[in-house]
Image: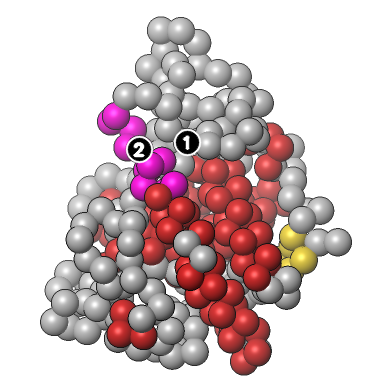
Amino acid sequence: MAYTRKDVTTLTRTERRRFVGALLEVKRRGEYDEFVRTHIEYYVPDGDLGLRTAHMAPSFLPWHRRFLLDLERALRRVDPSVTVPYWDWTKDRGTTSAPWTPDLLGGNGRRLDRRVTTGPFAYAEGNWTLKENVTDEKALTRDLGRARDPIDLPTRSELESALAEPVYDTAPWDSRSTKGFRNRLEGWGSGRGSAAWRNHNRVHRWVGGVMVGGASVNDPVFWLHHAFIDLQWWRWQQRHRQARYLPATPPPPGSEQYRRVVARHEKMPPWDVTPAELEDVSGIYRYA
């Protein structure tokens, strides 16, 4: 039977407590740090050679869908009632309301060093030491809104510009794709400031701290953000029912993207699963 992912603002006090408790237990067991390591490993820019699956590629959405499912399964092994909530950053745009409350993810980092000092994931609580990182920092950090160089969260109209795209993705199948739903949602743009980061990408930069870069999984808001991104893929699928993941076939030898992106029916590392197999998850979960 399919379970339900809810808007984080609708969680009851008990649901918040159980979600946080399951996250802390997965961290205590050492499983959480494996998720961080995986994301760091697969955070491959399109300027590098070799296969890209997690970012700057068509498989951005199915890769993170499976990644999110794996985390959710780990949480549900601890507490079967738990699902990953989503954070709708088009309407919940403050820095003190959910999910930034003491009983959920805690608040912003302190001015001195951006360390988070409130909530269950604060370093001083002793339950959330960063063990896998791209720096030596051991504490969770945030810089909500980037005080020194302010940046805004994406708007509903900016998200709509992605959802309106009728085609899943287009050549050159990387950060330079100017059309297609995938990159409009993933958010690689041109220019400076907010114009360079759209939708998904801008949210990472708005949160700041460890959410910027390959070790972004160290901030639990990563999962709430990606649950909302996954919801947008589901909404896009409902709107464009005839559309499918692209490319449908692998780029041919001699192509710039030969063996560098995953086609619809190719296996998507690190799992033995194809993007096509992840297009319909209605039998696993739904969104409230």
Q: Is residue 72 positioned above or below 266 on the image?
A: below
In the image, what residue type sits under mark 1? Answer: Thr
Q: Answer whether residue 169 is visible to the viewer in this image.
A: no
Name the residue that disc number 2 marks.
44
Question: Which residue occupies the foreground of this view, 72 or 149?
Answer: 72
Q: Answer whether residue 52 is visible to the viewer in this image.
A: yes
Residue 197 vs residue 90: left or right? left
Q: Secondary structure at mark 1?
A: loop
Q: Magenta region: which residues?
A: 38-48
Question: Which residue occupies the foreground of this view, 165 or 6?
Answer: 6
Name the residue that disc number 1 marks.
53
When asked about the image quadrant of residue 232, the answer is bottom right
User: Which image quarter holds the N terminus?
Assistant: bottom right
Q: Is residue 42 magenta?
A: yes
Q: Residue at x 50, y 43 (%)?
A: 60
Dot 1 crowding, Cα within 10 Å, few <14, some 14–19, many 20+: many
The image shows residue 284 at horizontal and vertical percentages of 77, 56
When asked about the image quadrant of residue 71, the answer is bottom right
Question: Which residue occupies the foreground of this view, 211 or 175?
Answer: 211
Q: Is residue 143 magenta?
A: no
Question: Which residue occupies the foreground of this view, 77 or 159?
Answer: 77
Marks 2 and 1 sit apart, C-alpha to C-alpha, by 8 Å
Can you tell which mark lies on residue 221? Answer: none
In the image, what residue type sits under mark 2? Answer: Val
Q: Is residue 186 positioned above or below 1 on the image?
A: above
Q: Residue at x 54, y 73 (%)?
A: 25
The image shows residue 162 at horizontal and vertical percentages of 51, 51
Residue 206 vs residue 285: left or right? left
Q: Are marks 2 and 1 in contact (CB under 8 Å)?
A: yes
User: Which image quarter holds the C terminus?
Assistant: bottom right
